[in-house]
Amino acid sequence: MTPDELKRAIAGGLECEHLDVVGDGRHFQAVVVSRAFEGLAKVRRHQLVYGALGDRMREDVHALSMQTLTPAEWSRARDEAS
């Protein structure tokens, strides 16, 4: 699996405002920004991403590290970085 394939899989199951995925084919890092995360705990946000990936998490992805943010959190994080 490539980072682009993983990105398409996440976007296919979860509406994202921003989505970035990097990785080596087995280990991936993702930044996922979605309104669906509003009011949810970190664990529940991750469950939504895992749900979007379905069986790919068991079959194609060995490890996925992710940062899950609401659009407001993403905006604040970008402002703090600049």
Image: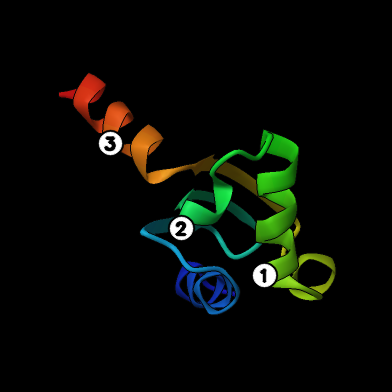
User: What residue would you read off at disc 2?
Assistant: 21
Secondary structure of residue under mark 1: helix
Distance from Cα at disc 1 to Cα at disc 2: 14 Å
Q: Quadrant of residue 68?
A: top right
Instruction: Nearest to the eye among marks 1 and 2: give it.
Output: 1
Do tag 1 and tag 2 residues touch (Cβ < 8 Å)? no
Instruction: Nearest to the eye among marks 3 and 1: give it.
Output: 3
Residue drawn at x 56%, y 68% is 14
User: What residue would you read off at disc 3?
Assistant: 75
- Mark 3 / mark 1, whichever is N-terminal: 1
User: In the rendered image, which quarter contains the C terminus?
Assistant: top left
Distance from Cα at disc 3 to Cα at disc 1: 24 Å
What is the three-letter code of the residue carrying label 3?
A: Ser
- Mark 1 / mark 2, whichever is N-terminal: 2
Q: Is residue 67 above or below residue 55?
A: above
Colouring mode (rainbow / by chain / secondary structure / one colour) = rainbow
The crowd level at tag 1 (other Cα within 10 Å; few <14, some 14-19, many 20+) is: some
Q: In the orientation shown, which residue stands out farthest toward the top?
A: 80
User: What residue would you read off at disc 1?
Assistant: 52
Instruction: Nearest to the eye among marks 2 and 3: give it.
Output: 3
